[in-house]
Image: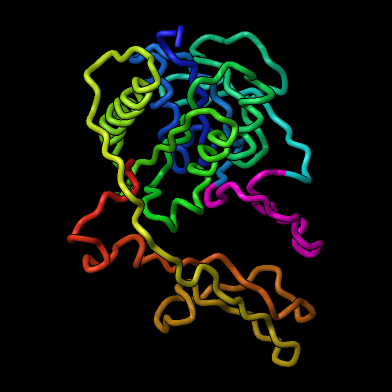
Amino acid sequence: MSKSRPTVLLTNDDGPPDSKESPYIFGLYKHLTERLGWTVKVVIPSSQRSWIGIRCHAPPISSLADHDQERRYQIKEITKGHYFYPTNPNGQGEISPVSRPLKENEVAEWILLDATPATCANIAIHNIHPNEIDLVVSGPNLGRNSSSAFALSSGTIGAAMSSSLSKVRSIALSYGTVVHPTPTTYFEPAHILGSNIIESSVAKLGFRRLEEGLKIYWTTMWRTSYGRLFKAITRPSSRSGETPKVDPAGPDSSTSPVEPVENATPTESDLVFKWSPTMEGLIRPDHSSLVGGKRWLGFA
């Protein structure tokens, strides 16, 4: 390639900088632009869009239409966007309906789309920055996307897969956070390691590398599966008039507190379910399920 440094599209599924839901994207952006000296374009969802992969979903039935149902590619909606201007030190910034010059302390102009990660990636590559992008980096995701079950549901990986289908080399990056809330002292080492991995991978495409590359291992992905992801919500009885309750820990728990079901009326359907995944086996797997007692969990 003729260029010594790549032009990168940075996207994610956690949305714009936020201390709780999207704490990492601004820090990685600064590492890629300031430490590596790369040109980085940012097109991300305007809000949290995890757990949506890349497949298309049909629009919801009318009784659920007022809920913001997540889709993989948005094929029925008009996708709208705004300009976002992150500032030091934490990436918070102003949103504008039109592009404008940077103000004092603003780092760059990003784009927020009311869209899924896969939609953001495709629009960025083909509409906003056509013929500009050498590499797509999706992430850093808040939490790990190791194993097949998490990977196939991940909006982070979905954006990278969407980009690869547009023939653009793509990397999905996740920070395997297991301490909550995550100490801010963890951020900088994660950004350094993450950007080093990205730089080492990009060097294989012919771009100049600033530092000696890391050794990268290709591996098979850990095969996992889901258990129950939703729980049934009990609706009120028209005869009893009792306030409906649901156990937030799931139907197998007998000791957890109960919570009322919102907006329930006696005339609504009995077929009502709420997202309440059982993830213990995926988050803390039994060692017997890991070949040889250990496994590379999705780092490739």
- 281, above or below 38, in the image: below
Query: Who's the residue at 37% across and 60% down the image?
Result: 223
For the residue pair 15 and 54, the one nearer the viewer reads as 54
Q: Position of residue 75 (x, y in %)?
A: 75, 44
Q: Is residue 87 left or right of residue 56?
A: left
> Residue 202, relative to residue 34: is it above or below?
below
Q: Say which quadrant the C terminus sits in.
A: top left
| Predominant SS along the magenta part | loop
Q: Quadrant of residue 226?
A: bottom left
Q: Residue at x 56, y 30 (%)?
A: 167
Q: Is residue 59 found inside the magenta-colored segment of the image?
A: yes
Residue 110, given in percent of the width and then of the height, sits at 57, 22
Q: Is residue 63 magenta?
A: yes
Q: Quadrant where the N terminus lies?
A: top left
Color theme of the render: rainbow
**Residue 240, x across and y down, in percent:** 70, 91
Q: Nearer the viewer, residue 210 or 232?
A: 210
Where residue 137 appears, x then y in whole percent? 46, 30
The residue stretch that appears in magenta: 50-74
